[in-house]
Image: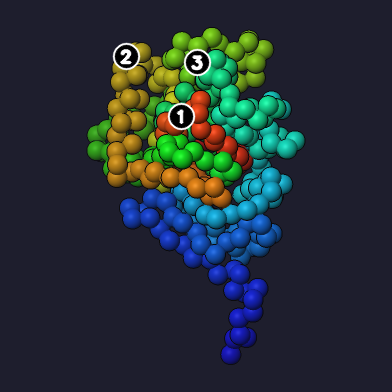
Amino acid sequence: MPAPATAHDKADQIAVHPFENGFGCELAGLDLSQPLTQARFETWHDAFERYSVVVIRGQHFSVAQHVAFSEWFGKLEQYEDPKDQAEGFNTIIRVSNIDKYTNAIKSLDDIGHKSFTLGTSDWHTDSSFRRIPSKASLLFAREVTPEGGDTAFASTSMAWEALPEDMQQRIEHLTVVHDFEETRRRFGLPPRPPEIRAKLPPVTHPLVTNLPDGRRALLIGMHAVRVEDMEPDASRAILDELKAFATQQQFVYRHKWRVGDLVMWDNRCTMHRAMPYALERDRRLLHRTTVAGEAAA
Ligand SMILES: [Fe+2]
């Protein structure tokens, strides 16, 4: 006969509530101010692999704890610029319209802020401009806006599966150039200095990637510049067509932020975008860790 449940066992009882269309889920019963256990991690990780977006609400934890539980999922990407980091951690990036040093709302004349805002307001996959795109992002809301500022997620694996077979065949062997400079180019902003650009040169990835569980997904979005070996107009047309297809309502989950929400998503099979908000009026501060990935297969 099994032993009666102890308080500790009870703490490991996490409920997984999938969203309606099978894309995304909410985890209940997890307190991230407590150290993660193997059992809790496995439940969380399984939900992440299965539903691509995991929402955990009502959390209170420190920056150090955010880093600690993120590291269970793998090595974290690092951010070199101190103004982007939180509390000295180079593995946390501030996603915010608030200046770290003055605590005031940033001016849109700040080119870096403008580029980040424009780039993240359109559909993208975090770090797709890196040689090895990231695996996952864990974004935590510390200050939210009274209106706007939702994050919308699109499943590029569900989109791939729903594509007509002739389209799948047409695109499955294509490769795409991704470049961090694309946002600045597209919006007519000045390029970053050459020595900075040299650290993140354009990279090439397959348009259709393979996930470890056999699913396939589209790797597209804002940082995707062009399809290799294709005329610019045809290349733009196909990237735009795929983006429009993948962001249809049936593939999208839109998250309305509350303070204390942690949202984790799978960068290998999703895109996301930040919805508009009053950038020069309302404060918004989120902290993100990013789990490094393996080369796109
Ligand atoms: Fe992003």
- Name the amino acid, label 3: Arg
Disc 3 versus disc 1: distance between alpha carbons?
21 Å
Label 3 SS: helix
Residue 77 position in % (x across, y down): 64, 36
Q: Where is residue 151 in the image (x, y as percent from the top left)?
A: 44, 39
Label 3 vs 2, first from the N-terminus: 3
Q: Look at the numbered discs 3 and 1 and tell me whether their residues touch, using CB distance below 8 Å.
A: no
Examine the rendering and report whether any part of residue 90 can be seen.
yes
Which marked residue is nearer to the observer: mark 3 or mark 1?
A: 1
Which residue corresponds to the image point at 29% horizontal and 38% vertical from the top-left? 248
Establish whether ligand 1 lies closer than 8 Å to the Cβ of label 1. Answer: no
At a point 38% along the width and 50% down the height, the residue shown is 23
Q: Distance between the residues labelled 2 and 1?
A: 34 Å
The residue most toward the bottom is 1
**Colour style of the rendered protein structure:** rainbow
- Mark 1 residue element: loop
Task: Measure the alpha-carbon separation of dots 3 and 2.
Answer: 20 Å
Residue 235 to residue 38: above or below = above
Q: Residue visible at 57% across and 61% down? A: 30
Q: What percent of the width, then of the height, locates residue 34?
A: 67, 60
Which mark is drawn over residue 184?
3
Determine the residue positioned at 56% across, 20% down. 107
Mark 2 highlights which residue?
Answer: 233
Residue matched to label 1: 278
Numbered label tally:
3
| Disc 3: residue Cβ within 8 A of ligand 1's nearest atom | no
Considering only order in the chain, which callout, 1 or 2, is on the residue closer to the N terminus? Answer: 2
Placement of 41 over or under 278, stated as above or below: below
- Asked whether residue 295 appears in the rendered view, the answer is no
Q: Which amino acid does label 1 sit on?
A: Ala
Q: What crowding class fits label 2: few (fewer than 14 Cα within 10 Å), some (14-19), or many (20 or more)?
A: few
The kind of secondary structure element at disc 2 is helix
